[in-house]
């Protein structure tokens, strides 16, 4: 019995049928048309749709399993990284083994690019790509769900209502993650639900508790040890969604809440993929062992890795310099050497000036947060 059928990624024998279904899906083809050719899609909709479908059928003709699809996707991701970053680097992967499954737990800044960057890094290193956790709130259209599950994504049910339904969803999710690791395949999951829009990367201990929920009969330390949790910090010099996040933080501060528009997640996904990111760096830690007694201790260990290894760019230090007065405990810190060169300062100033004035404090604090976390950790 396939107890994870409704949330698991598609398997090799399912790939071809799902691809054929997607190629016949008008919503899918139309979305590609608007995304890839925004101007032409309005002038020649029918001809463009036919051309896109023809090109995709030819491109995907020999794709019959997950690996061959990921090879295709990997090329696209590689080109996207080249176009949208000044540099892409990573460290720590040399300490990991190709024959061992890991649970990669990262900070969460971008809906698509966070797991994509981890995927491409481990792929380049010769490790197996992980199964990717994605919330069902992002899968409002059937073709989006198909696309994600084709690329080794599994669904996190966030729409469950009522205590029993939520508990059942968490138990199923926990079981899937533990069984996947036990079966020799890796997992990617964020350290918290939702992106850290304020730049403060902090692990939600509820995520750690969820991981152990299906293993309650086993000692906590044993479960954590077998999961091989690898903390990973992802640093973006510039966040393509920074203005959108600053607006949301401002509106929440002013009105107590923020109502997303229906297409806002879609816009954030597109902006995160095609937007310029400057320099990007990933730092992979070593697997957490069996020395942890509870979820709080594990969360603290993940946080320490994030704050210690997050690659701080001049954009972070320049932002901190402008809001340093708001952190009295760090008022005496001097950062002259970390503020970059004239080009760094000019780029940063242009970025800040492009943001609405009333949103700028939130934008600055977003970029400053990793510096604040690092300095406070060092002061302990």
Image: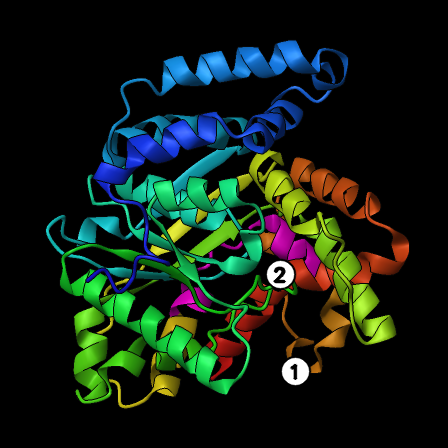
Specify the farthest residue to the left.
Answer: 99
Q: Which residue is mark 1?
A: 329
Q: Which residues are magenta?
A: 305-319
Question: Is residue 326 found left or right of 367 in the rendered image?
Answer: right
Q: Residues within 10 Å of mark 2 (few under 14, many from 20)?
A: few
Magenta highlight on residue 55 = no
Residue 239 placed where, x, y %?
62, 47
Distance of label 1 from label 2 (alpha carbons):
15 Å
Q: Secondary structure at mark 1?
A: helix
Please give the name of the residue rendered at 62% of the width and 23% of the height, measured from the top-left corner. Answer: 33
Q: Which residue is mark 2?
A: 335
Question: Is residue 21 found left or right of 341 in the rendered image?
Answer: left
Magenta highlight on residue 309 = yes
94 lies above or below 358: above
Q: Can residue 44 be spotted in the picture?
A: yes
121 lies above or below 361: above
Residue 200 placed where, x, y %?
58, 68
Picture quarter containing residue 246?
bottom right
């Amino acid at each position: 019995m396939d107890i994870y059928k409704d949330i698991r990624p598609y398997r090799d024998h399912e790939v071809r049928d799902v691809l054929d279904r997607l190629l016949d899906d008008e919503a899918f083809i139309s979305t590609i048309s608007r995304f890839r050719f925004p101007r032409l899609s309005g002038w020649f909709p029918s001809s463009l749709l036919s051309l896109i479908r023809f090109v995709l059928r030819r491109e995907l003709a020999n794709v019959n399993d997950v690996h061959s699809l990921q090879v295709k996707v990997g090329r696209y991701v590689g080109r996207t990284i080249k176009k949208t970053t000044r540099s892409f680097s990573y460290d720590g992967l040399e300490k990991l083994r190709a024959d061992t499954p890991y649970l990669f737990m990262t900070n969460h800044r971008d809906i698509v690019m966070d797991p994509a960057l981890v995927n491409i890094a481990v792929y380049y290193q010769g490790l197996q790509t992980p199964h990717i956790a994605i919330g069902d709130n992002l899968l409002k259209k059937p073709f989006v769900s198909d696309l994600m599950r084709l690329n080794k994504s599994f669904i996190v049910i966030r729409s469950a209502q009522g205590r029993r339904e939520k508990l059942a969803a968490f138990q199923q999710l926990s079981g899937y993650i533990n069984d996947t690791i036990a079966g020799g395949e890796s997992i990617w999951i964020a350290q918290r639900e939702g992106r850290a829009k304020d730049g403060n990367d902090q692990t939600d201990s509820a995520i750690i508790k969820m991981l152990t929920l299906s293993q309650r009969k086993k000692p906590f330390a044993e479960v954590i040890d077998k999961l091989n949790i690898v903390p990973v910090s992802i640093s973006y010099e510039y966040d393509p969604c920074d203005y959108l996040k600053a607006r949301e933080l401002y509106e929440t501060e002013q009105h107590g809440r923020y109502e997303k528009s229906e297409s806002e997640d879609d816009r954030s996904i597109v902006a995160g993929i095609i937007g310029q990111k400057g320099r990007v760096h990933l730092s992979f830690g070593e697997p957490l062992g069996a020395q942890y007694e509870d979820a709080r201790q594990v969360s603290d260990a993940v946080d320490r890795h994030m704050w210690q290894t997050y690659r701080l760019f001049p954009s972070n230090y320049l932002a901190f310099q402008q809001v340093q007065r708001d952190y009295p405990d760090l008022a005496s810190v001097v950062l002259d050497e970390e503020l970059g060169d004239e080009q760094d300062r000019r780029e940063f100033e242009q970025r800040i000036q492009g943001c609405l004035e009333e949103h700028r404090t939130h934008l600055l604090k977003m970029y400053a947060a990793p510096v604040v976390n690092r300095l406070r950790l060092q002061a302990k």
